[in-house]
Image (cartoon, rainbow, N blue to C red):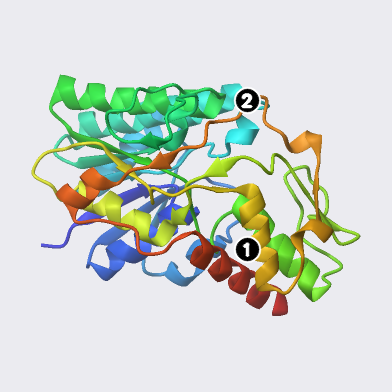
Amino acid sequence: MTKTALITGITGQDGSYLADLLLDKGYQVVGIVRRSTNYRYPNIDHLIGRVTLAYADLIDADALGDIIRRHQPDEVYNLAAQSVPADSWSQPIVTGEITALGAVRMMEAVRRHQPDARFYQATSREIYGGVPQEIVDEQTPFLANNPYGIAKLYAHLMTVNYRESYGMFACAGMLFNHESPRRGLHFVTRKVTMGAACIKLGITNPPLNEAGEPLVRDGKLKMGNLDAYRDWGYAKEYVEAMWLMLQQDTPQDYVIGTNTAYSIRDLCRVAFDHVGLNWEDHVETDERFLRPTEIFAQRGNPAKAKADLGWEPRTYFEELTRLMVDSDLALLSK
């Protein structure tokens, strides 16, 4: 019997890779997208005709309920969010509405219209933001310290609440930073890899950065805190963990990471080295891109995921960075 999976955020990095995975496994895939005048979704261009798109917004509970009732999915993956921590200070209300309450609207739609469906909530390492310990696992206390992390923590705790209160198969993945060539340009990894590619190729009309300005100007890339550390993995591999969580006998929450940490400075060095440039000649700090609060340097320990799910990362920081630079070079060369 063919299973049906519903993905919110299918046009994003994770949603598109998850759709690839599920289609390869023989699922019917339904993706929720917001109705707009832009009907081009680069991350899923290759999937048009193979997936069904349903139009709704995470602020519209009735529309979400209609979609669940109509498609009766076996699995629901809630990946949609206002997903940029840096933007959450300037947009705290919309972050709460979509990232926090949007998850509850999805779970409530599942509870009312397809209670036997298995539900995955995309939690974030940002729920541990202010915790001073370096290695994080499922026993680490939560200490979110920015509006995005706080919204994700609310969604996470509500996932646990729905599981315990209603007996739903609901679980959450506390995913540490995961990147790919499909990452948006407002995320630091893609900003750096695209910046390095633009400078290497002498691109005169680069894409815009998060401030709405040219990403590169006069051979310079403007960055925020170069000393911030992150645990970076490959998004294509992380969606496998999402799927595996919903295949278990009982729902549980898992930390997904590589148990490594590198700085933004390291990221710049590896990316620019790969194109034969000295990053210090091209990267400048701009105070506009500094966070009001910074999360501690942390590594996600995936030991439980390895033991229970058989999952572990295969692609690590330097290989991933070079992969992304090569992809951006190829994209710009077109």
Q: Residue drawn at (72%, 41%), measured in percent from left and top?
A: 224
Q: Residue drawn at (25%, 34%), measured in percent from left and top?
A: 110
Q: Is residue 72 above or below residue 94?
A: below
Question: Which sits in the foreground, 92 or 194?
Answer: 194
Mark 2 crowdedness (10 Å alpha carbons): few <14, some 14-19, many ≥20: few
Reading the chain from its start, which is encountered first: label 1 or label 2? 1
Q: Measured from the top left, where is residue 266 in percent x and y?
A: 62, 54
Please state which amino acid type lies under the numbered disc 2: Thr
Question: Judging from the image, what secondary structure is the residue with disc 2 in?
Answer: loop
Question: Judging from the image, what secondary structure is the residue with disc 1 in?
Answer: helix
Q: Is residue 39 left or right of residue 253?
A: right
Q: Is residue 26 left or right of residue 313?
A: left
Q: Determine whether label 1 and label 2 are within 8 Å by CB.
A: no
Q: How many marks?
A: 2
Q: Residue drawn at (44%, 26%), measured in percent from left and top?
A: 100
Where residue 207 sits, quadrant-wise, is bottom right
Residue lying farthest to the bottom in this orientation: 334
Question: Which sits in the foreground, 143 or 52?
Answer: 143
Q: Can see residue 11?
A: no
Label 2 belongs to which residue? 293
Q: Is residue 43 above or below residue 146?
A: below
Q: Is residue 170 above or below residue 153?
A: below
Mark 1 crowdedness (10 Å alpha carbons): few <14, some 14-19, many ≥20: many
Where residue 326 sits, quadrant-wise, is bottom right
Question: Which sits in the foreground, 25 or 65?
Answer: 25
Please state which amino acid type lies under the numbered disc 1: Val
| Distance of label 1 from label 2 (alpha carbons) | 26 Å
Q: Is residue 134 above or below residue 279?
A: above
The disc at residue 270 is 1
Query: Which image quadrant: the C terminus?
Result: bottom right
Q: Is residue 14 left or right of residue 321?
A: left
